[in-house]
Image: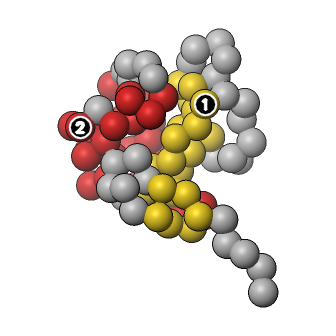
Amino acid sequence: MKKIPMRKCVATQEQCPKKELLRIVRTPEGTIEVDTTGKLNGRGAYLKKDEAAVELAKKKGSLAKALECTIPDEVYEKIMEVVRG
């Protein structure tokens, strides 16, 4: 049986399979990207693919804390678009 990689959502603090989470990356250039491939270089943080989790991360600032930088609203909008499909 193959081991499922688990990651913790920065907003809800729950462990989830990596596939169910969205990776947000602060690249070495300092930009914030939504990493759909999971292979982008930089500091990554995982968010549950759930609108409530994204709202929570925005409200608590947990994504900004995890990536050690401020997150512009456009980034949250982009994350929401990805979450909604």
Going from the N terminus, do you reach mark 2 or mark 1 first? 1
Is 54 situated left or right of 69 in this image?
left
**Residue beneath disc 2:** 60
The residue that appears at 77% across and 79% down in the rendered structure is 2
Quadrant hosting residue 65: top left
Query: Which residue is at the front of the view, 20 or 43?
Result: 43
x and y, in percent, of residue 81 in the image: 43, 45
Is 83 situated left or right of 32 in this image?
left
Observer able to see residue 49: no
Single out the residue that lies furthest toward the bottom: 1
**Residue beneath disc 1:** 43
Q: Amino acid at mark 1?
A: Arg
In the rendered view, would you say 53 is above or below 6? above
Single out the residue that lies furthest toward the top: 29
x and y, in percent, of residue 78 in the image: 44, 36
The residue that appears at 50% across and 66% down in the rendered structure is 16
Q: Amino acid at mark 2?
A: Lys
Is 83 situated left or right of 60 in this image?
right
Query: Which residue is at the front of the view, 12 or 83?
Result: 12
Dot 2: within a 10 Å radius of its alpha carbon, few (fewer than 14), some, or many (20 or more) residues? Answer: few
Single out the residue that lies furthest toward the right: 1
Mark 2 lies on a secondary structure that is helix
Dot 1: within a 10 Å radius of its alpha carbon, few (fewer than 14), some, or many (20 or more) residues? Answer: some
x and y, in percent, of residue 58 in the image: 28, 36
Quadrant hosting residue 51: bottom left
Mark 1 lies on a secondary structure that is strand
Query: Which residue is at the front of the view, 6 or 41?
Result: 6
In the rendered view, would you say 28 is above or below 22? above
Label drawn at residue 59 = none
In the rendered view, would you say 50 is above or below 11? below
In the rendered view, would you say 29 is above or below 57? above
Is 37 situated left or right of 44 in this image?
right
